[in-house]
Amino acid sequence: MRTHNWIRLTAVLLILAAGCTKEDEPNDATKAKTIDEQVEALLGSMTLEEKIGQMTQAERGALTNITDIKTYHLGSLLSGGGSSPSSNTPSAWADMYDGYQAMALSTRLKIPLLYGIDAVHGHNNVKGATIFPHNIGLGATRDADLVKRAAAVVAKEVAGTGIDWTFAPCIAVPRDERWGRTYEGFGETPELQVMMAPAAVQGFQGTLSGKNTEILACAKHFVGDGGTAGGDDQGNTVLTEEQLRAIHMPGYVEAIKQGVGSIMASYNSWNGTKLHGHKYLLTDVLKGELGFQGFVVSDWEAVDQISGDYPTAILYAISAGVDMVMVPIRYQYFIAELKKLVQRGDIPMYRIDDAVRRILKVKFRMGLFEKPFTDRSLTATVGSAAHRAVARECVQKSLVLLKNSNAVLPLKKNAARIHVAGKNADDIGNQCGGWTISWQGMSGNITTGTTILQALRKAVPNASAVTFSVTGSGAAGADVGIVVVGETPYAEGAGDNSQLTLSSEDLSAVANMKAAGIPVVVILISGRPMIINSVVSEADAVVAAWLPGTEGEGVADVLFGDVNFSGVLPHSWPRSVQQLPLNLGDAVYDPLFPYGFGLKYGM
């Protein structure tokens, strides 16, 4: 990779050569043609190499040289989790993006890049961006309008760094909390996806008509990713077609109705067949029956899993209906092998043309040909106070009150002393969870935000009245104790967990606080329900706060009663892992807390 300064200089020179900016308007000749006419005219002038380039998505960090964008006619780049410019600031991202885009526009046909990123709970790769609760928390709000507003904020921040495509919303239906991606879905029922999927698509895309604040949405992962046996990531979903359609497909139907421009195929298998090679589901059902007009993109190196023989894997994936392949590393090899498959007649040209037509149509709809570069007026909005206010509201409405004996909550701001404990009380990284700055996330002061401890201190007249010890020691004499426990960051794969128990550190902090003889409030930071029977018995109040993101003040707002609890459970809460999978509608249904449960003040 070139340095950030080199990219910025290259961007400036190439932009000047191209003679266009994000604010330029299309000329009259372009306006006179319909999008379909423009697509067909462009498609008709493309070589096979140029078409295959449009079907290729490479990871920015894998580029051997920025000129490979031009050499291989690349149609798309992405930043995987943690893949960022050396200076991880909004302006550096915009400079980087414009450098890549300018290189794409120096090609013969000047087809702009689509740049994708996993902005799954905010523009979460970028330091200083607004980080929202993960989808499990948004599912607890039951507020589709709020989800739409949150997605619109994310779109604006993403656009402020030039990027035009988010791999979101995830509309998986997680049916087993042992799955490490449980927090990426809105909840365990198809009804929640039907409610939230179209709202998220609307927020990200708007009408996908070329507005600078609109970005391309990507509904994922089609289909059945949340239903694998045992919650095994990338595993096998064993269901009848009727069950697959009833549980895992309704969210996609609604996303397609809203014009979602891209859909990502899933790693999982359905009854033993990998989705990336499943022609019936990707072509017959998705593109045919459901009428999806956008393009299908593969997941990270997922095509490789179809067959141990890579050319065969490519053949199966493209034939099944994958239009753009997230390679993401060995893009030269992929391009060479796909070209051979076409030249031998193994993949017909009409399948290539269909894929490229779908990709180009989205690029034209987005206005990328007329406005390919970053709108720098949006860059300063990344992490703005107005955006953080929306995220704070999301936090407020996502909290679920599971227990409140003797009306311990709301807290009193004039309390003589509130003692806080737990490893998650003052850790912005733990508060945000996975997919934050890096792929798996990490503990610590990783980005700008307000921890729960900081928020509690800001909310009271005398900040010194809020004391803290990680272990819960020193609690004696306090009016109330608050223990913030739960999970530390993880993402797919590493997040699979067969136990779902709290750590000994967490249990000890709760016990120490309880031993002080004061009322105890436990706040659980987690990406899913956990086994907390003993904690529920010991604590006077228990709050499920999920993974709230950077705005800890939303937690304090509700704990002090400035805002009432309104969240309800998006998952059935198990008594033990032996009950899993446990979902609403099961023949035997005996949860610790049922789906939809949630207390409020005054109840």
Image (cartoon, grey):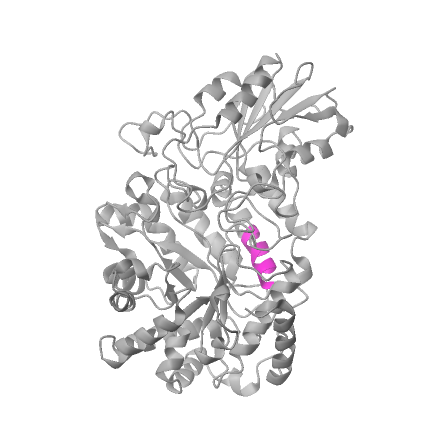
Please indicate, yes or no, whether residue 411 appears anywhere in the rendered image: no
Q: Nearer the viewer, residue 573 or 142?
A: 573
Q: How many marks?
A: 0
Residue 376 falls inside the magenta stretch: no
The residue lying furthest to the right in this view is 462
Q: Residue placed at 42% from the left, 65% from the top?
A: 329
Please indicate, yes or no, whether residue 586 appears anywhere in the rendered image: yes
Q: Residue placed at 31% from the left, 64% from the top?
A: 287
For the magenta stretch, what is the residue range?
149-159
Rendered-image quadrant of the C terminus:
top right
Percent from the top left, x then y, of residue 45?
40, 87
Percent from the top left, x then y, of residue 276?
30, 59
Q: Main secondary structure of the magenta part?
A: helix
Q: Is residue 26 above or below residue 546?
A: below
Q: Is residue 360 above or below residue 441?
A: below
Percent from the top left, x then y, of residue 258?
44, 59
Left or right, 586 with respect to 94, comes to: left
Left or right, 475 with respect to 149, comes to: right
Residue 158 falls inside the magenta stretch: yes
- The answer to which image quadrant residue 57 occupies is bottom left
Percent from the top left, x then y, of residue 232?
32, 43
